[in-house]
Amino acid sequence: MTLPPALAEIVEDFAALGDSDKITLLLEFAAELPDLPEHLKQEAMEPVPECQSPVFLSVDAGDPESVRLYFTAPPEAPTTRGFAAILHQGLDTASAQEILDVPSDFYHELGLGSAVSPLRLRGMAGMLARIKAQVRTQTGIGGSAPPGSGRPGA
Amino acid sequence: MSVETDPNPAFADYAHPERLVSTQWLSAHLGAKGLKIIESDEDVLLYDIGHIPTAQKIDWHLHLNDPVTRDYINGEQFAELMRSKGIERDDTIVIYGDKSNWWAAYALWVFTLFGHEDVRLLDGGRDAWMAEDRETSFDVPEYPRSDYPVVERDDSLIRAFKPQVLEAIGKEPLVDVRSPQEYTGERTHMPDYPEEGALRGGHIPTAISIPWAKAAAPDGRFRPRAELDEIYRDLDPDTPTIAYCRIGERSSHTWFVLTYLLGFTKVRNYDGSWTEWGNAVRVPIAVGEEPGAAPGVE
């Protein structure tokens, strides 16, 4: 699995812990999610109808060698904040290509399934997919091919 | 042993006021013998960032679902869960949670499948407690194991399965409690819940749309009886009625309202809900704002 070094380190840290320590670590991540920069705060306040887990994310791939990621989620959604913080600390300032190369199912390696449930973990996959889509749109890297296409004979 | 009920006059008009407790009541009864408090949330980490003192966490995904089959845990597993939490069969259980108690109502519905008699909701849930700056704790309490008996789950009274719902079309009222966009078919999942989507959008023909959240006031508490009577005026308290949503959690909230606040006697929750129906082959579906007719009926 090819992960940018920062994300690989986070994955290793989680994988080494038992369930209750994993939860503690995820909460630490949630607490460390930085505030949005001023210019994104207004945009993030636009309401989403019946949205139960309102994560806001913004991608700036203006410099494909150092993609900037911005997230916010309310304090009453600590799991979402924790997932966002993992992606932020693991992928902010990575290159566009590095981000596109992150396997969509990398989160399995965190071993969080039994602590937060596999279904909830897919929320992190959803965030990663949104990030990759933005990176593709902004840089043109990888064209518009959906993941998994291009397999011979598929 | 069970604990006295909350005499709060705000609950007096409900059909079963004994099913609710207020934040004041719970605050005054913390530590009462025979009282166990359970937090059950959408966000699984909320409990860990501070909870009502003495409360324990039960998570729907992790604790109430069978890990392999799409079903709830069985009698053995439920008994083990209760024993590990120190809960006795005759204890009073108060459940609370985030999002106007929708997951708490879901847990309460599952507890009811196992016939736990005295299980109540904290009106307003977690948000009400926090909004009043009441005491919170990080301590995860450990109670001595109980000898909770193995009771087989009874799916016959309050749970509906797909064949029964098919049979009910055109004969029994169906209530779709999802958002209007999900009802019409414009959306096949809730925003941010793509993993719980369905291949087809729309609703079960003849189902009327009464979104669950109408029953909750902005502060997360249940609306007064008169307002609830108005919201559910198209339904009859003695007619068998089936409620559904996407996975059965929002419809548990409606099931609670109809059964305990309005005194309906035959409400079942179709927990397969849209994630089953919208993916099933050859079941009838209606799209748009109208309930639609039963198949074969013009």
Image (cartoon, coloured by chain):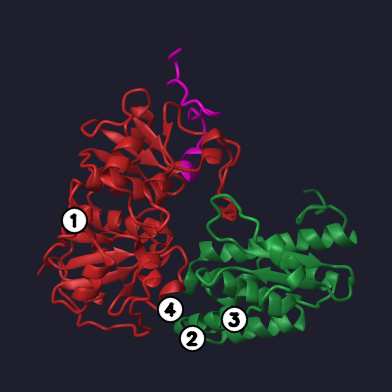
Chain colours: A green, B red
**Residue behind mark 3:** A29
Badge 3 sits on which subunit? A
Name the residue type under label 3. Answer: Phe
Helix, strand or loop at disc 2?
A: helix
Q: Are marks 3 and 1 in contact (CB under 8 Å)?
A: no
Q: Are marks 2 and 1 in contact (CB under 8 Å)?
A: no
Residue at the location (25% across, 69% down)? B24
Q: Are marks 3 and 4 in contact (CB under 8 Å)?
A: no
B5, B196: nearer the viewer: B5
User: Residue B218, percent across and down?
Assistant: 43, 54
Tell us which disc is closer to us: 4 or 1: 1
**Residue behind mark 4:** B48
**Residue behind mark 1:** B9
A112, A88: nearer the viewer: A88
> Does the magenta-highlighted stretch encompass residue B279?
yes
Q: Tell me how far mark 2 sits from mark 4, CA to CA.
A: 12 Å
Q: Tell me how far mark 2 sits from mark 1, CA to CA.
A: 44 Å
Badge 4 sits on which subunit? B
